Amino acid sequence: MSKRYAVVLAAGQGTRMKSKLYKVLHPVCGKPMVQHVVDQVKMLHIDEIVTIIGHGAELVKSQLGEQSSFALQAEQLGTAHAVMQAKEMLDRKDGVTIVVCGDTPLIKAETMEAIFKHHEETGAKATILTALADEPTGYGRIIRNEDGLVAKIVEHKDASDEERKINEINTGTYCFDNQALFAALSNVSNDNVQGEYYLPDVVEILKAQGEVVSAFQTAEFEETLGVNDRVALSEAERILKKRINEGHMRNGVTIIDPMNTYIGADVQIGQDTIVYPGTYLMGQTVIGADCEIGPNTEVQDCEIGNETIIRQSVAHDSQIGSNVNIGPFAHIRPKSNIHDEVKIGNFVEIKKSQFGKGSKASHLSYIGDAEVGQDVNIGCGTITVNYDGKNKFLTKIEDGTFIGCNSNLVAPVTIGRGAYVAAGSTITEDVPGEALSIARARQVNKENYVTKMNLKK
Ligand code: UD1
Ligand code: CA
């Protein structure tokens, strides 16, 4: 097999988005468009991926990191000019180069693989991925000769009324013989309505040289949707959401209302898990089997075991075990590790804490920077006082302890194994194991106080 290279075009500002965020960084189903494209490209056994960056270069670079090499297009003079920036990196290499736009987030690896195959089989110097669009406005049109072969591509803005009636469009994905591509690029002019160097003009140049240019038409127009404005962005969101949700349902996940369930492209969910409406599952979240998630729950970058229930709650960047019961209205903040069979009830906030197997915080608590052992019962309203205004400190709550309601545990502090803390205590010193600690003022009853003070009318 010949060597394969990829060029991802991601330097444009995306004026039509009317946004301070650069176009290719706009998320679709929680992931930036350019990341969707690169993730699919990565599945193709490519020898080198070069992303063309310009607007928001640093941000695109930090998004993609090691996954790509980068070439800077300092001024955005058009898509041909963009590809030219990869010349130093790819120019003399033998092989096939796929060019993809960073604003076509729905393109699938299998479609790119098909165009690669088609290109390799036909021995063409260029192969264009085309599609039939119901509404082709804005896209480049494929102009074919009488013999059915591609003659050229005309941009919407440059097209005649007659040409605008053509509904076969350029999807913006192409395969090129690498050397032929870079040779042809230097002949592209900017003599057009937009004054830009158009990559599709390479087609006409190669044709004039007597080379074979081929078109590969995909039946999936939806997959090639180019996002130029926020209307198209919402369209992409709708299509990808449907694709993702259907994928999970076919894998045995119940989604009660797929229209109102938002799952990121990389989320994994086990069989017989039920996802209720209004739920957002994002990032690198992995959910086990037989769980119940939602309604109205947000989970980002969490690993969740089996048979766990999370209702109307928020959980970020944490580990949550099996048979755990969370919510309603709980907040699991980053770096928490909730072990199996734990219960985190209503209005409980957990931050950067370990929560041992079988432990419970059922109501109204803040547990931050804590190590909670197994089988601990944290009474209603317990607070770890972890912050002195400057630094954060650790609270250790050992196995089998019972923390009475409305206690303050002023860190750093350790509650020893099996100890009891009386309700309403403010604990500032370590409590030995098996002890009962009472840290509050004694109750004083002033008999007949009201009568003496004449308070009663
Ligand atoms: C382009 C194609 C059009 C095709 C459509 C498919 C050209 C001239 N037109 O049009 O035929 O139907 O895609 O979606 O290629 N970019 C750069 N540098 C530049 C200009 C653009 O990196 O100087 C990048 C953009 O960031 C974007 C991609 O190239 O990711 C496409 O550019 P865009 O301006 O969106 O092209 P379209 O007008 O959509
Ligand atoms: Ca576009």
Image (spheres, rainbow, N blue to C red):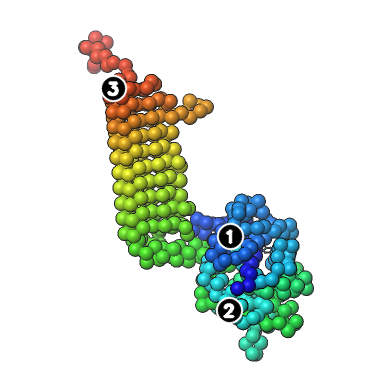
Residue 19 in the figure: left or right of residue 387:
right
Task: Nearest to the eye among marks 2 and 1: give it.
Answer: 2
Q: CA distance from mark 3 to mark 2?
A: 76 Å
Mark 1 sits near ligand 1, with its Cβ under 8 Å away? yes
Residue type, label 1: Val
Instruction: Specify the farthest residue to the front.
Output: 1
Q: Where's residue 327, x and y in %?
A: 33, 44
Residue in view at x 45 percent, y 46 percent: 317
Residue under label 3, please give it: 435
Crowd band around label 1 with a 10 angstrom C-alpha radius: few (<14), some (14–19), many (20+): many
For this view, does 154 lie left or right of residue 26? right
Label placed on residue 34: 1
Badge 1 marks a residue whose secondary structure is: helix
In percent of the image, x 67 and y 57: which residue is there? 70
Residue 118: assigned label:
2
Secondary element type, mark 2: helix
Q: Earlier in the sequence, mark 3 or mark 2?
A: 2
Is 314 drawn above or below residue 379 in the view shown? below
Q: Is residue 201 left or right of residue 375?
A: right
| Disc nearest the viewer among 1 and 3 | 3
Find the distance from the CA under tag 1 to the CA under tag 3.
59 Å
Residue 262 horizontal/vertical position (percent): 43, 57
Residue at 62% of width from left, 82% of height from top? Answer: 122
* Closer to us: 176 or 197: 176
Cα distance, mark 2 to mark 1? Answer: 25 Å
